[in-house]
Image (tube, rainbow, N blue to C red):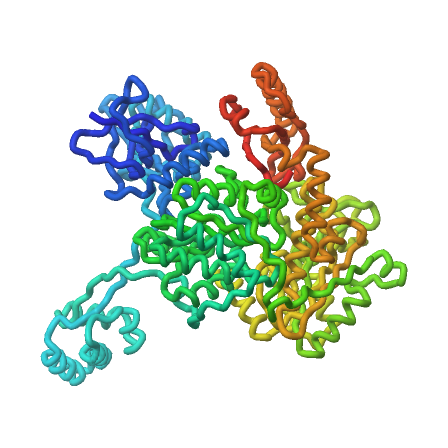
Amino acid sequence: MGYAEVCVNSPVAPRQTFSYAIPSGMNISIGQAVLVPFGEKVLQGIVLALSEYPAVAETREIAEIIEPQPVLSPAAVSLAGWISQYYLSPIFDAVALMLPPGFERKALTFITASPLLPDFDLSSLTPDQKLLLETVRKEDKVNLRRLENKTGKKKSQSIISQLVKRGLATRSYELEPVRASPRQEPYLNLAISPDQAQQEASSLNKSGARKQAALLDFLIQQPGTVSLAAARKETRSNKSVVDALVSKGLVATEYIQTRRDPLSAWNVNLSLPLPLTASQDAVFRPIRKSLAEQTDSKIFLLHGVTGSGKTEIYLQALAETIKTGKRGIVLVPEIALTPQTIERFASRFPGKVAVLHSQLSLGEQFDEWQRIRAGEFDVVIGPRSALFAPQPDLGLIIVDEEHEWTYKQDDKSPRYHTRNVAIKLSGLTGATVILGSATPDVETFYHACRGDYHLLHLPERVTPSENAPLPRVEIVDLKDELKAGNRSLFSHSLSEAISNAVTAGEQVILFLNRRGAATFIQCRNCGFTLNCRRCDVPLSYHLDEDMLVCHQCNYRTAVPRVCPRCQSRRIKFLGTGTQKLEQETGTAFPQARLLRWDSDATRKKDSHREILERFRSHQADILIGTQMVTKGLDLPRVTLVGAVNADYGLNRPDFRAGERTFQLLSQVAGRAGRGPRGGQVIIQTYTPEHYAIQAAAKHDYSLFYEREITYRRQLHNPPFSRLARLTFSHTNDAFCRKEAENLRRLLIEERDARGIAGLTVIGPAPAFIHRLRGRFRWQLVLRGADPSAFLAPVSIPQGWAIDIDPVGL
């Protein structure tokens, strides 16, 4: 008998697998999905290893196989193990990243009443026990969730345990229904010969059944089967018409599997490779050599200024990959970038591009995933989750805008960074990795300078022509504007530039990294600020809804007419967001057509594509947006970019604040001047002397990097150390703080006992947002050479979230 090491889909399963015996006659492979007994339940599991001997003395048998073919490749199994080990996450959390969409199914608990013995005395039950037992006896079995909703979770579970103990009820477990499966569409065809159908249609017309006759005539004219939806639409028939013809034996129905195609509505024109400039050819040669010869230089950092033609390098690298019989994955940092990226790649590889992102329906994600696994696509495009697509014969991974912090999953386990996982996947598959950015992450650039990655430079723009200059940048000191009596959102320079651009038929982008209309409201009488009742953050005012909204938990409430504390009516709206900017822009420039691009304006499925298409087709003159407008957009009509307030985020208590400000300003500046008219950028700030703003205005990454890396070295921050953040949350603040202090003592004792030098425990301290969704949060930060290895053997108490290599503190 063989044995399998299985990771189990259970929240109580730790960072380990469980040994199960393989029943005689059952063929099991690594990566296969199975059902296994786990406690009283039967749960999903994935086989991660096979062995001749069990890891424990007693084992239970695998219950059954879920799918005949493995759902994970050997490389995916190895990658999941590395993610779990490196990021200290439960193994199934790592495996779940790579499973088919909709695969995860929780175990549901059902309660069934046992037959009552004739002499059983019902009066021995409490009223609550009687009520719940009567509810269960009315049906064969009842979902425990229904009982919990009826009587409360803790109370119902306690009563059920009492009934089970007395033999009056039993528990059983089933997996919840399948959430995603192939779509089966009904199709119609004739059940009789066309000549017979013609006679039947004539008879139906004579008898007054004209709709049935029309549908029959329509089917006679079709060369084969036709979808029910198309037939009903063409003949304006309803379901009863179809059912009547089926019941008479004139028409047959069959179900055919069809694909839900997320690109079905896209009109994509074929494009051909562009001739490379001398600079592009110089960086492309080593990439092509790596792809063709499988050389050791697998990781490339492509550092190219905005508009330098990095995308063309990506496209031609993919073409080379496909020539060798391999395939590629292209990662973008946000869904907002996906529409234009899809167009570029789909036009170069028509019919061979798959898309995976969270705004697709579950059915669309399922179909794309299955076709990717079948090898039907040369290229997969999407945000960070697309890295785990089951792309066979992987030869190239492109991480565009590699510096973006959205590549870090920090809201749930495993808290992985896409860039690091891509590099690990490269080692497992032999794929080449291209990390591309105009403003590389400081740590990435440091490793490239040290020789860990192969550094490639594209120093000149190729749009609108080769060696085109970068847009000129003007820094406006908002302190001077205030001294001159200008209290509007627009400096004199920006106001004049917007008027000139709109009058000339050009386009403008205004960047403000705050959404809503006002960032908080305050009583001018007593100073009271209205905060979220569940989070320690001020509520933002949203103009379009006339509501106060928490940007953390989405709590919403009406704007108070009077101050809740002192009853004063002197309530002031303070701070500015994109909605307020849109309002003031409309007032200042009434002749301009406006468009806003932020998360409030992109809640619908195709919102990003629709907004981009409207602006690109010049249905708007001014685009107002948050960081969504800063990245990757190629809009030749944009001649002016205005950073309305460059200081947002600059003074956050995070050592990366300067880096993020520089990156945002550099990226948004890069949207200007991509057409023949050139461009200009105006940065409005209260701190014009800050090195991040000065470097962004000069388009000088080296200037910024040298200053930043000096600070990092002095303070021993990454890349000269590594960090781990441990966060504990609880509804009781005092308990939360006590737990944090206890863990600090435990970690210091562990460090000292193991004699680990250079490891610092910082904190505990309240998290930046102290209370979030009703729970207080305290955090510890470890700084050292390898905090992940230090924490791996430590038994961390329940309730702690571990973030290895956090991108924000």
In the image, taking residue 270 as reference, residue 312 lies left or right, namely right
Along the line of sight, which residue is nearer the eye, 11 or 239? 11
In the image, taking residue 203 as reference, residue 544 lies left or right, namely right
Location of residue 386 in the rendering, given as x and y in whole percent from the top left corner: 44, 50
Q: Could you tell me which residue is drawn at 26 percent across and 22 percent down? A: 53
- Residue 392 in sight in this render: yes
Q: Could you tell me which residue is drawn at 73 percent across and 65 percent down? A: 472
Which residue is at the far top?
753
Q: Could you tell me which residue is drawn at 20 percent across and 82 percent down? A: 208
**Residue 156 figure quarter:** top left
Location of residue 200 in the rendering, given as x and y in whole percent from the top left corner: 13, 79
Residue 522 lies, with reference to residue 730, above or below; the image says: below
In the image, taking residue 266 as reference, residue 755 lies left or right, namely right
In the image, taking residue 331 as reference, residue 769 lies left or right, namely right
Q: Could you tell me which residue is drawn at 41 percent across and 60 percent down? A: 319
Residue 683 lies, with reference to residue 637, above or below; the image says: above
Along the line of sight, which residue is nearer the eye, 196 or 570? 196
**Residue 411 figure quarter:** top right
- Residue 520 in sight in this render: no
Residue 553 lies, with reference to residue 12, above or below; the image says: below
Location of residue 420 in the rendering, given as x and y in whole percent from the top left corner: 51, 41
Along the line of sight, which residue is nearer the eye, 187 or 796? 796
How many badges with numbers are in the image?
Answer: 0
Which quadrant holds the N terminus?
A: top left
Location of residue 135 in the rendering, given as x and y in whole percent from the top left corner: 34, 36
Which quadrant holds the C terminus?
A: top right
**Residue 255 figure quarter:** bottom left
